[in-house]
Image (tube, rainbow, N blue to C red):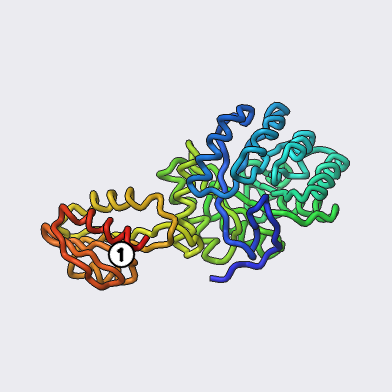
Amino acid sequence: MRRRETSNFKIGEVGVGSAYPVSIQSMTNTDTRNAEATLQQIGQLAEAGCQLVRVAVPDEEAAQALKQICKQSPLPVIADIHFNHRLALLAMENGVSALRINPGNIGSAQKVREVVSKAKGLGIPIRIGVNAGSLEKELLARYQHPTAEALVESAMRHVHILEELNFEQIKISLKASDVPLMIEAYRLIAQQVPYPLHLGVTEAGNAKYGTVKSAIGIGTLLAEGIGDTIRVSLTGNPLQEIPVAKQILRSLELYPKGVELISCPTCGRTQIGLEHLVEQVDQLVSNIDKPLKLAVMGCVVNGPGEAREADLGIAGGKGEGLIFRKGEIIKKVPEDQLLAAFQEELDKLL
């Protein structure tokens, strides 16, 4: 896998672009005007592994709350602005690290110049965010329905506005709830601009639907080297987005921290309570940041062999099991002692 080369900049302390690792972003679902509630959720997202956070700024009260939020936030804060250039100016004055704003939607050329001038002076990047569900009416009329070409044309209109003002700290997203459309749009724009891309499947649904759609859409593009920041959009508490995002990155060897837990699907040879054991191990290792590959296998015949690359593993038998490391058997213990024996060896590794 070879990353697409892009321009590079920082959002707060987080590097964005091909010179930096792909970063995980989320968005609060609190009322931004409630600074305390918003900060509490940002803190939870940071603890879960989120690196960038976006907040909605629907009015001046929310923009004013950003002063406290940005000052106390453990993560760089991105202000989500629509239509009102004054909110963008106020958000920057109050300390945001980046804007999500489409310059063609905030009014006159003079208003755009005001926002861009301030962003340039403060070193604040701007993300152009195009959604299939909110394309310009003229583009919809011409293309008949949202297409990859229409999404790219919309994005490029906004890009040209910024480029004409000599603004280069640009990030772009082209989101759709239709996965093939989203993939095609990002592939097209990746060939036309040097800017970092923010990947996401919008309106992806709840965890059942959104996890799969996001894994396919985001994962396909990342596997092709496209993408610099990602957000897994799931209905509900944004905390549930972070483990999914981390697993997408980890599955492509793009996330260097934490545990990769592998386990077999079970078959007729399985003679221990493997599913319960996997859940116990998963809970045991959920807060480990060290990069480890751990395995829980249901068969002593193939377990150590199939998972020989694992730093530590369990292979079940009939009423007993093996603890192994890098394919080498360490010990054999009764089934009811497997978890304790595994934890003992895990503590040695840590």
Q: Inspect this view and state whether residue 84 appears.
A: no
Tell me the crowding category of disc 1: few under 14, some 14 to 19, or many 20 or more residues within 10 angstroms, Cα based.
many
- Which residue: 70% across, 38% down? 81
Residue 266, x across and y down, in percent: 22, 58
Give left or right: position of 109 versus 211: right
* Amino acid at the residue labelled 1: Leu
Question: Is residue 334 shown above or below 242?
Answer: below
Q: Which residue lies furthest to the front in this view?
A: 348
Name the quadrant of the C terminus.
bottom left
In the image, residue 130 sits, relative to residue 68, either above or below, namely below
**Residue 16 in which image quadrant:** bottom right
**Residue 203: where, in percent of width, then height?**
53, 42
Seen as rendered, the residue at the extreme right is 110
Identify the residue position indicated by label 1 in the image: 312
Q: What residue is drawn where x is 57% and y is 59%?
A: 22
Q: Position of residue 294 (x, y in %)?
A: 33, 61
In-front residue for pair 156/138: 156
How many labels were placed on the picture?
1
| Horizontal side of residue 103 vs 241, given as left or right | right
Question: In this rendering, is residue 98 above or below 39?
Answer: below
Q: Where is residue 70 in the image (x, y as percent from the top left)?
A: 66, 39
Q: Residue 2, can we see it? A: yes
The residue that appears at 77% across and 38% down in the rendered structure is 93
Secondary structure state at the residue bearing disc 1 = strand
Quarter where residue 72 is shown: top right
